[in-house]
Image (spheres, helix red, strand yellow):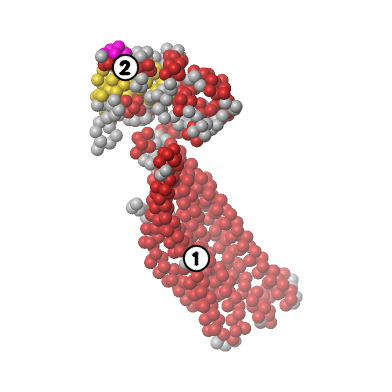
Amino acid sequence: MQIKQSIWQLLSRLWHHISPRRRVQFGILLVLMLLTSFAEIVSIGAILPFLGMLTAPEQFFKLPFTQLFLQVLNLTDLTQLLFAFTFVFIVAILLAAAMRLILLWYSTRLSFVTGADLSVNIYRRTLYQPYEVHCARNSSAIINAILSKANDVINGIIMPALTMISSTLILVTVIISLLALNPTIALFVFGGLGIIYGSIIYLTRKQLLIHGQRIASQSNNIIKSLQEGLGGIRDVLIDGSQDTYCQIYRDTDAPLRRAQGNCMFLSQSPRYGIEAFGMILIVVLAYSIAQEAGGLIKSIPMLGALALCAQRTLPVLQQAYSSWTSIRINQASLQDTLDLLDQPLPSYAFQLATQQLPFNHSISLKQLDFRYSQQTPYVLKQINLTIAKGSRVAIIGTTGSGKSTLLDIVMGLLQPTGGVLIIDDEIVTSVNQRSWQAHIAHVPQAIFLADSTIEENIAFGVPKNQIDHRRVRQAAQQAQLTESIQKWPDKYQTYVGERGVRLSGGQRQRIGIARALYKQADVIIFDEATSALDNETEQAVMQSIESLSKDLTILIIAHRLTTIKNCTQIIELGEGVIKKIGNFEQVVSLKNK
């Protein structure tokens, strides 16, 4: 995967997806960072008078600042003064620690709630994408982005970026404090550390980016390999192909773990060398200062301040470096996440309710062409068709003749390449497409069932507390499902298992039909929906459907003659064009002679 933009451009794009409320909270966080940096200055500044009191109390007692301090606090002797400075130093240390703790709590909390916002936004935008977009992409990439890459953005981008800002502010305050004490030592120390970290960053930047790209791509493949192995578990068990799928997983997982391990090493390894360098530096400085006039006693306050600066600086430097490596590693994941966050939302996504498009007369297709891309052949060509409201229409044809594609266009899932879909006198476009879909219920050949109750699957997509129980039972009865439900101990509260694994094929199909009837749509589309039913049950289901309101329009793709013999209109497709239109006798009976 090629990184298209710099990290600063990616962060700018990410900022546009942060809600106004979160932006205000990030402003509060910046204030907290500044206060924490100020607390660091106070804690470092307090050590000099404290150590000065311990090493040379008589000289310190004579300083003008000390006299002012004594007058304000009404102190009379050295013991009281020493106690006061000890107390101030302890308070400064506790204040700095408390501010760091508050900053950690707030930044962590803000990072994760922001990550939750991003994750929900990705899922929402993905669900609103057109059907052809979903057909063109692998679901594993979406699942990985929502579950894993959104977390990578939290842990690998947002939190490290906040840590870098905080660390930079603390480093600046420590440098300022040290410059005030001894400019030469400050420049020498921070210059040396800066050169070391700068060299490490320069040498590792490409490797980190390569490893990050590998992690981003392989994490998609991990989800894909798991979906394929577990999704086809029946065939895996029958064929005994467990080792094959384990090997596929191993070949995907091993490069991912190796890249993660390399990144962790590159992120953590400088710490040990830098800590050793810092300790050696303090020892050398102590030796040098001890050789000057006044000896070691005079240098103790300075060495104490240096030791405290080192204690603050080295971990902060390592945090800043680790944060930089984390951002570099997760740059590819950030780009993938932003590509999903940038998915456009249709206009109806912002509407509270969708008003149905008027449908009183007919569904018309005029000069309709369709192909999936400019590189593929036409699936449908010059289709002209009118379906009257209340009619029962069957669409027949060989495999690949375009039957399901035609129904997908009627349902508004696919946009015609050429020509138009007209409801009464209004052309269906991307603007009013959702208004037309409010009329439609769809029963596919493969029914998707959630791992929930029979009732929740019939009222699919309806919040549990809003389910109309009477309507559920009525739909189940019309779908010839009531007898089966009554045999189960929990009746309508029976759990169906993942993808309906605890039900027979016919039971799953009848739940799908009941789902369409529960919706009380005035257009029901059956895409080989009765193929899993036995002849007797299919006849009973079709009779129930035919007994419904005469205003109900039914479109059926089926191969059994028993399913379509009562249809008012039969359309035969072949090679993407309409070959015949007529009633059952005109199209099917003549064809079989």
Residue at 66% from the left image edge and 65% from the top image edge = 91
Q: Which mark is residue 570?
A: 2
In the visual, does 376 lie left or right of 481? left
Give the vertical position of 584 relative to 514 (above or below): above
| Three-letter amino acid code at the position of disc 1 | Gln
Give the vertical position of 512 relative to 17 (above or below): above
Mark 1: secondary structure: helix
Disc 1 to disc 2, how far (Cα)?
74 Å
Q: Give x and y (percent) for residue 352.
A: 48, 30
Task: Report the span colored magenta.
Answer: 584-590
Q: Which residue is mark 1?
A: 318
Quadrant hosting residue 210: bottom left
Give the vertical position of 396 relative to 126 (above or below): above
| Three-letter amino acid code at the position of disc 2 | Ile
| First of labels 1, 2 by sequence position | 1
Residue at 50% from the left image edge and 63% from the top image edge = 319
Indicate yes or no whether the magenta region holds residue 587: yes
